Image (cartoon, coloured by chain):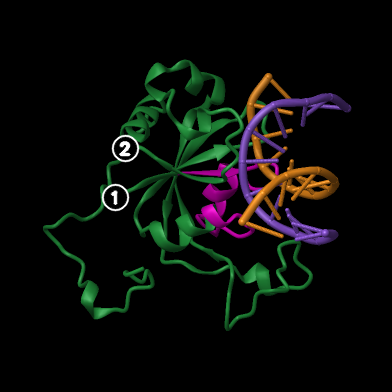
Chain colours: A green, B orange, C purple
Amino acid sequence: MSHWLIKSEPEVFSIADLARVRREPWTGVRNYQARNFMWKDMRPGELALFYHSNAKPPGIAGVARVAGPPHPDPTQFEPASEYFDPKASPAAPRWWLVDFEYVTTFESMLTLAELKSDPSLAAMLVCQRGSRLSIQPVAASHFTRICQLGGWQDNNPPATAASPAPSHFTPSPYGGSH
DNA sequence: GCCAACGTTGGC
DNA sequence: GCCAACGTTGGC
């Protein structure tokens, strides 16, 4: 079970927007490292901190959840889109994404300044200077601490080994051996 | 394959 | 608006 942080500029798409639409395909990521996290590493049910970037102030506004398996970002095929990629085709997509669904909005946003002032969060990637990666893995301890600071706890933890998923019934989109 | 130039991100 | 950090591009 991995944890994540996803950045969005609230003037473009905020956590309030996610709360309204409930589920959103995370289009427009054009960084290979960020894409690979969505393509290969995220699993449905995993939780992500929703970070407002380019905001005054920037910070973590709430929590979202990976809502499904990866699929091609449709905007790469749309010539009118600012995310159009002429090197991509439906037969050979270059950009993959997952959908995120709304989980919660923190009662008050945890600002970046607050995160940086907490010694237990000093190692977080988002606290590092020059960290631009728009999708980042988050250590479980950091995730737990932030949810504690945000006044939220997960009351719907994912199913455990008591009800194993019949993974052999459906083909996995994740590949497996490289 | 190096690396300078350029573009973007995003805090401040 | 500034600019540091980082990623990508393209000449060679």
The disc label shown at residue A27, or none: none
Q: Position of residue A99 (x, y in %)?
A: 49, 60
Magenta-tinted stretch: A5-33
Q: Is residue A26 magenta?
A: yes
Image-based side of A176 in relation to A102, left or right: left
Which residue appears at 59% of the width and 70% of the height?
Answer: A94
Q: Residue at x 30, y 40 (%)?
A: A154
Please tell me which residue lies in front, A155 or A168.
A168
- Residue receiving disc 1: A1
Eyeballing the image, is A116 above or below A99? above
Give the mark nearer the N terminus: 1 vs 2: 1
Q: CA distance from mark 1 to mark 2?
A: 9 Å
Indicate the quadrant where residue A14 lies.
top right
Q: Amino acid at mark 2?
A: Ala
Residue A84: image x %, image y %? 72, 68
Residue that numbered label 2 is attached to: A140
Is residue A137 highlighted in magenta?
Answer: no
Callout 2: SS:
helix
- Identify the chain of the residue marked 1, using the numbered disc in the image: A
Image quadrant in which you'd find residue A78: bottom right
* Residue contact at pointers 1 and 2, CB within 8 angstroms: yes
- As rendered, which of A119 and A144 lies closer to the eye? A119
Could you tell me which residue is drawn at 41 percent across and 64 percent down?
A: A68
Pick out the residue farthest to the left.
Answer: A162
Position of the C terminus of chain A, as image quadrant, is bottom left
Mark 2, other Cα within 10 Å: few <14 / some 14–19 / many ≥20: few
| Residue at the spot 29% in from the left edge and 78% down from the top edge | A170
Secondary structure state at the residue bearing disc 1: loop
Residue A114 location in percent, x, y? 50, 19
Position of residue A109 measured from the top left corner of the image (x, y, whole percent): 52, 28
